[in-house]
Amino acid sequence: MMSERYRATYERSIVDAESFWLDAAKAIDWIAPPRTAWSDRSGWFAGATLNSCYNAVDRHVAAGRGGQTALIYDSPVTGTIRHYSYVELLDQVSATAGMLERLGVGKGDRVVLYMPMIPETAFAMLACARLGAIHSVVFGGFAPPELAKRIDDARPRLLLTASCGIEGSRQIAYKPLVDQALALAAHAVEHVVVMQRPMLAAELTAPRDLDWSKLLADSEPVSCVPVAAEDPLYILYTSGTTGTPKGVVRDNGGHAVALTWSMRHIYGIRPGDVFWAASDVGWVVGHSYIVYGPLIAGATTILFEGKPVGTPDAGTYWRTIARHGVEIFFTAPTAMRAIRKEDPDARHLKAIGTGNLRAVFLAGERADPDTLAWAEAVTGLPVIDHWWQTELGWPAAATCFGLGDTRRRRGSAGFPVPGYVFDILSDEGTPVPAGDTGHVVLKTPLPPGCYRSLWNNPAGYAKSFATFDGYYETGDAGHVDGDGFVNIMGRTDDIINVAGHRLSTGQMEQIVASQPEIAECAVIGVDDALKGMVPVAFAVTKAGIEADGALPDAIVARVRAELGAVAALREVHVVRALPKTRSGKILRAVLRSLANGKDVATPPTIEDADVLTEYRRLFRLG
Ligand code: COA
Ligand code: AMP
């Protein structure tokens, strides 16, 4: 049933956005409080000043809740569980800020983090915020060339890393990857600060490389620097449609207000509650809901170093939930599918229970109704699909659990979240009838917390607002059904979601095409029972070059070396030709359909109908 609270809140957020967001802003401790919410010229809360780290850490200590647990580090891969109270978090963060300040980091400087899921990563993010510096976390699954691109774009003063990450039972040495990235990058960082983990020591080369723990031991705590609401808090690179990642810039003020509002009204979390987002700090979910959201809201957050399965088994999520009294759990559908695959009867869950858990939220990719039904059946709890993206920073469609809404429909990501106005438009920009699929767009101005620029890329930013006048183009396709449920069905561009990770097939095509034997190629996303989608490449060799059996492996290795293991490209087909229209456009939809095992009629625009015969044979169709 629609809750009256949701209805009234949504309506007010739209008809009286100014007072709605100024009221929401009261949940933040400002240095100079905002007098206006939105301004066309300066964005959200122009003229106000604050510090995001103060709001996430210091203010809870000042309010007398310093003894409450702020962060729990639970690492099944190292057999470690550590609790940090808000006082301990303050000590760690202010000392880390002191270390960064001594190395010359100040307001507006960039700091790149290439870090595993250890508490020091969160400390360092908050320490940057404390100094008004701009962090840019690069996910550990990206290869050196990708890290190099981000270094060259962000031009950081420092790079922070650790000696290794742990992937299941494997150690991944990060420092050699950082060294390679810095060798590739045109920009030189002043220092690389390395957290030496006990299981692997990294080699440090003076004077550039420094030991994190030694520096920290000598550092003096520093206090928070005031920043303007619209000053950047972080840059987070995400896949665009080209090989160049987009540097999404998040402001301080709008972000703090939106996240606090979302913790309470979407997730139903109050100070002192325990919240766990099982993601990685390298993604937006990690930024918003492992670090900033729960801490600004005064909750307890969990930083989990492990995987849904294999660390050590498919019960690890339920064990973590029960052990720490997690009330709201956020994960990706892929993780649920991985758990279900290993433990279809949920034996672990039955043995462990769900403790204090009240609801599970899913996002990052479409939640297939079957997985959702399974998760609801085994947990006996509401499992809530909700939708957002790096650009937005917080959910745009959800069932607002914290506002008492209970309406859910499997396959749908819920309803517009207060602050967001959805429309579904045709290619021509006109609204489509209810139930018809079209471009999912959001009315501008977007609410607080959403991106206001792309780093060094104003044209890229403007592009997302140029196609449909008065709207932000999300890049997703979907429909709104007769009851108002928003359904997100997939992308309208060449971005794919692999195990909840956002990747560009266009970028993979550039890498495949750089293989010397290859003349042209296409990479598409094919449905996968575990990862949602996986990339599959089709490559045509240059005239006169005979492909041998080693070519697909060489291409897989190239994508892994240039983009990273996270690309998960494992299937490469060397083909005679790509299916194309007479005007030379690759028939990607046809390719996707055939690769998914669904035959289609040969399109009349095809240049050479015989080409499809080969693909039908390849996928055993017809
Ligand atoms: N550092 C280094 N390498 C990493 C990495 C990191 N932080 N994260 C992933 N990788 C590597 C993996 O080790 C793997 O390498 P491999 O090809 O050598 O095995 C590769 O990248 C692909 O990783 P992943 O997509 O995680 O697949 P997987 O087969 O290891 O695990 C799942 C499958 C479903 C268990 C896993 O994808 C998962 O937990 N997904 C949930 C993701 C999630 O929660 N996303 C949140 C976004 S909201
Ligand atoms: P990211 O920016 O990495 O968070 O990826 C955002 C993209 O993931 C969105 O544009 C969607 O394509 C997809 N996505 C995220 N959440 C959902 C969801 N709940 N349902 C469908 N697609 C989703």
Image (tube, rainbow, N blue to C red):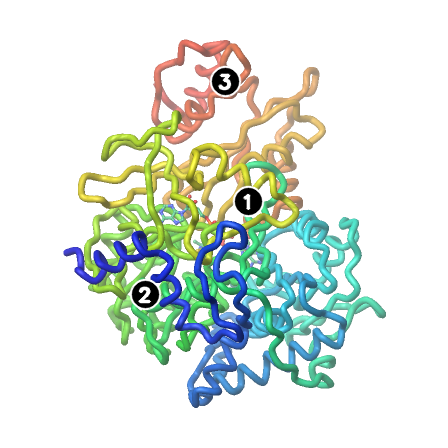
In-front residue for pair 552/301: 301
In-front residue for pair 253/214: 253
Question: Which image quadrant is residue 170 in?
Answer: bottom right
Q: Is mark 3 within 8 Å of ligand 2?
A: no
Compared across the picture, whether 12 is left or right of 578 comes to left
Question: Which image quadrant is residue 297 in?
Answer: bottom left
Query: How far across and how far down the image is residue 278, in percent?
Result: 42, 64
Q: Few, some or many C-alpha atoms within 10 Å of disc 3 (few <14, some 14-19, many ≥20)?
A: many
Query: How far across and how far down the image is residue 359, in percent?
Result: 27, 65
**Separation (CA) of disc 3 from disc 1:** 26 Å
Query: How far across and how far down the image is residue 27, in percent?
Result: 40, 73
Q: Are marks 3 and 1 in contact (CB under 8 Å)?
A: no
Element class at badge 1: loop
* Quadrant of the snapshot with the C terminus: top left
Disc on the earlier residue, 3 or 1: 1
In-front residue for pair 284/163: 284
Q: Are marks 1 and 2 in contact (CB under 8 Å)?
A: no
Instruction: Give the residue pinned by disc 3.
Output: 579
Up the image or down, 468 lies above or below 351; here it is above
Disc on the earlier residue, 3 or 2: 2
- Asked if one can make out residue 290 in the rendered structure from this viewpoint, the answer is no
- Asked if one can make out residue 596 in the rendered structure from this viewpoint, the answer is yes
- Amino acid type at circle 3 is Pro
**Separation (CA) of disc 1 from disc 2:** 27 Å
Element class at badge 2: loop
Q: Which mark is residue 239?
A: 1
Residue lying furthest left in this view? 1
Up the image or down, 469 lies above or below 275; here it is above
Q: Is mark 1 within 8 Å of ligand 2?
A: yes
For the point 59% across and 82% down, the residue is: 92
Instruction: Give the residue pinned by disc 2.
Output: 267
